[in-house]
Amino acid sequence: MSLDREFAALHAGPGLLVLPNAWDAGSARVIEAAGAQAIATSSAAVSWSYGYPDETLPFEKLVATVAEIVRIVRIPVSADIVAGYAADAASVEEPLTRILDAGAVGVNIEDGRDAPEILAAKIERARSVAARKGIALWINARTDVYLRGLVPVAEAFGESVRRAALYRQAGADSIFVPALKDPDEIARMVSAVGLPLNLLAWDGVPDAAALGKLGVRRLSAGGWLARAAYNRAYNDARAFLAEGRVGIFTSPEISVPPLNDLMRR
């Protein structure tokens, strides 16, 4: 089965697709070794890996990262392309083409604070570009209504559903609603959007088993795994600088397989 078809099949179940988002080739390979069925990048985590704040990463660096991840893993790769590195549908074609040429079979593309009609038009163009290249691209359309508080709380559910309908009609394959966490609203959202629902790991979000029972199809770590890695590096560096003890690097015991053995030429 081709990687694009494989990625699509993962959204059909029977289990919930859990994605511990990667930020570079090494993290992707480690995540693959841990048992991940696919790799998705996090825009924030990739940006931090190059020393940039989220949403300011130069596009060339994103393309290079995706290409290196595709080189080293043997599972499908989906790229977080934020708003498509484009202000409108016409200008999304070139960045999307380059991401596909780098080997991605899925993309995460968001509306942010833009009018939802702009993202719908970008999705239509992305679907057309992928079709011309013979790729069954999986388009995960992210709406930031809850995440950015774009409307009053009482209106967030209805506005998210309205946007999801636009994105579905434009050709999206799944809908990503970060910061949605109430179980009752999640169950209603699953029924209302008519596409596989993707949620973000978030304080208060039910665990994977509970989400699966609610009908959610995909759970993303976003930037949290990278935050945890940087947090560990920060704390260990502080301790090493203060005390110079080697033991801090082996306690708790390192469980990752030997890194040189994991990596590929």
Image (tube, rainbow, N blue to C red):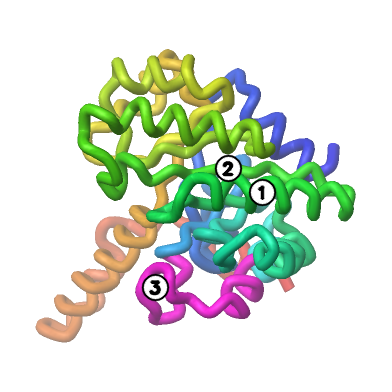
Give x and y (percent) for residue 133: 87, 54
Give x and y (percent) for residue 27: 51, 62
Q: Secondary structure at mark 1?
A: strand
Q: Is 65 a magenta residue?
A: yes
Q: Amino acid at mark 2?
A: Asn
For disc 3, the marked residue is: 48
The residue under the point 25% across, 45% down is 149
- State the CA–CA distance, disc 1 to disc 2: 7 Å
Residue 76 in sight: yes
- Mark 1 Cα-neighbour bin, 10 Å: few <14, some 14–19, many ≥20: many
Q: Between residues 96 and 27, which one lies in front from this camera angle?
A: 96
Please tell me whether mark 3 or mark 2 is closer to you in this view: 2
- Mark 2 Cα-neighbour bin, 10 Å: few <14, some 14–19, many ≥20: many
Q: Amino acid at mark 1?
A: Gly
Quadrant of the rendered structure where residue 89 is? bottom right
Q: Secondary structure at mark 3?
A: helix
Q: Secondary structure at mark 2?
A: strand
The residue under the point 54% across, 29% down is 165
Please tell me whether mark 1 or mark 2 is closer to you in this view: 2
Vertical placement of residue 250 versus 211, above or below? below
* Marked residue nearer the N-terminal end (3 or 2): 3
For disc 1, the marked residue is: 106
Q: Is 5 a magenta residue?
A: no
Say if mark 3 contacts mark 2, CB within 8 Å: no
Q: Amino acid at mark 3?
A: Trp
- State the CA–CA distance, disc 3 to disc 1: 22 Å
Q: Which residues are magenta?
A: 45-66
For disc 2, the marked residue is: 140
The residue under the point 54% across, 43% down is 141
The residue under the point 30% across, 26% down is 206
